[in-house]
Image (cartoon, coloured by chain):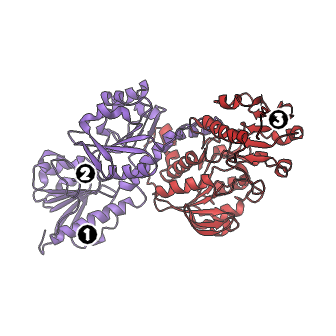
Chain colours: A purple, B red
Amino acid sequence: MIGTEIPVLAVLCGDRRPPDMDAVEAAAEIRYTDEKGLPDALRGADALFVYDFLSTAVPGAWHAADRIRWVHIASAGVDPVMFPELRESDVVLTNSRGVFDDSIAEYVLGVVIAFAKDLPRSLELQRQRRWQHRESERVAGRRALVVGTGPIGRAIARLLRAAGLDVSGMGRRARGEDPDFGTVHASADLVRVAAGFDYVIAVAPLTDETKGMFDAAAFAAMKPSARFVNVGRGELVVTDELVTALRAGEIAGAALDVFDTEPLPVDHPLWTLDNVVISPHMSGDFVGWRNTLVEVFADNFARWRDGRPLRNVVDKQLGYVPSGH
Amino acid sequence: MIGTEIPVLAVLCGDRRPPDMDAVEAAAEIRYTDEKGLPDALRGADALFVYDFLSTAVPGAWHAADRIRWVHIASAGVDPVMFPELRESDVVLTNSRGVFDDSIAEYVLGVVIAFAKDLPRSLELQRQRRWQHRESERVAGRRALVVGTGPIGRAIARLLRAAGLDVSGMGRRARGEDPDFGTVHASADLVRVAAGFDYVIAVAPLTDETKGMFDAAAFAAMKPSARFVNVGRGELVVTDELVTALRAGEIAGAALDVFDTEPLPVDHPLWTLDNVVISPHMSGDFVGWRNTLVEVFADNFARWRDGRPLRNVVDKQLGYVPSGH
């Protein structure tokens, strides 16, 4: 926007208000709200900051958004706001691309090495005070497929390669000579190429095309020694089929940071499989991440106030920020 | 040796005979033995292969070694054969330098990331089916001190640096501009420099100078947020003082692969400290390591038969293979 009017900004945050909002507060009328108050907060608002990025309340409150022109979400994945009314509107959508890249990459390398060195078993034996020598796997030379060629996938590819793994990518379209991935396979070829990899890492955006792409056929196509890592979205996976594949030994293990239902229900079978590592949607959340998320938003807010181009503009047809933007 | 005589080779291996010994067996009279039979096996033997590298039986049997000219040990650390009679003799001692370097480096990077990402706690919460989000630490930019500048320490330094850590080394003498470490501090300065590091990694050879170097004063000098990693020898550490430091919160955690008593006794307090990761002296033992150890020995055996220079000749005064040899 350009003008002298003070804009009205709705901030969906529930009880946990974003830190470091002073600069934004000085330049906007801010309506901090929880899910229940969202329709009232949206009525007459110019922009919406979805700070509570796990909330699914935006579609249901959207009927009240009578003058919104910009929505920003404090996450990399934009699937919680990918509903038809927003998608087909002129509202500009931006995300927090870049904040989580390197932290998630470190998490992925950590679980890869943990699998190779049998660290979960060492911790279990330690609990039992049992000294039981095992041989471990090398990491260098193992092959990893990173499914998702956005900035997080690229950071993962670079770090795994630095640790000696042989990395390929998977995206919408096949291509060669990618600077981070070398070869990029097409997602449509997952079942055909999966057998070639020791680690398959899911970090694709959740779209109509990627939803459920890791299903029984995909797991059956992987090596029995393969490990599956999900740092993308739970809905990329047909969870029941993953459980079946793990129980049947079709793959050797999984490290899961995201789930189709979060928190993972207490009676879910994934909790108890001994070849699974579960973490509670935290792989990217380094100390200081909330401040960084607000920095990214505040930078875009200043741009929006000044009429300058926004950063991280989502292609609402693709469902993510296209590369090079 | 050079000559037409068939040499006699004693192999200390207990019940577990080394694999892939065909080439050596074709060129020597081999006496496979356990600790009890070692004196008889040594009597009249030309060479000794200490395949059971954790055995401490060699000094007690050495009185029977009446014509030994070469001892090879299937490990990087040579402390089990660093007794005065061997040290002061003309017997050549070689080790298995190089076999474990990259595997141990992967283990070290794995525990560093596991600490940063709070992986042990995630596994404990998983056992309790508890979903509890925590913020995690970044790995990139953290400072690591690798104590020990041999080939294993160098492999650790290179891999940690590849993962974005800022790495320094510590050796007998201070020096700058080292290709792997940049700055190398002198061991004598441990207490003075320890406060500058987030991770302190012990991989020094066990010698009179390094024994017990990680003591109360060293741990007190480290940051309260520091983690200590030992992949060298248990005796580098004053274990009781490490336990005290961990309990007092003088350091934040430890990952220990080696102990002054192995197996670690079942009633040892280290088993139960929740900021400790214990593994049973396995960090270097990748699938295939036993074959690789025999390859290294067999190569040296062929050299010895032919009168060619041996690889990995230990400086018996230093207690390790000097760099550049």
| x then y, percent, for residue A182 | 32, 47
Q: Amino acid at mark 1?
A: Val
- The residue wearing badge 1 is A24
- The residue wearing badge 3 is B45
> Is the C-beta separation of discs 2 and 1 under 8 Å?
no
Q: In the image, which is nearer the foreground, mark 2 or mark 1?
A: 1
| x then y, percent, for residue B166 | 51, 63
Image quarter of residue B263 = top right
Labels 3 and 1 share a subunit: no
| x then y, percent, for residue B302 | 68, 38
> Is the C-beta separation of discs 3 and 1 under 8 Å?
no
- The residue wearing badge 2 is A35
Instruction: Point out the tag, 2 or 1, that comes first from the N-terminus.
Output: 1
Closer to us: A33 or B35: B35
| x then y, percent, for residue A280 | 41, 45
As drawn, B213 above or below A306:
above
Closer to us: A36 or A165: A165
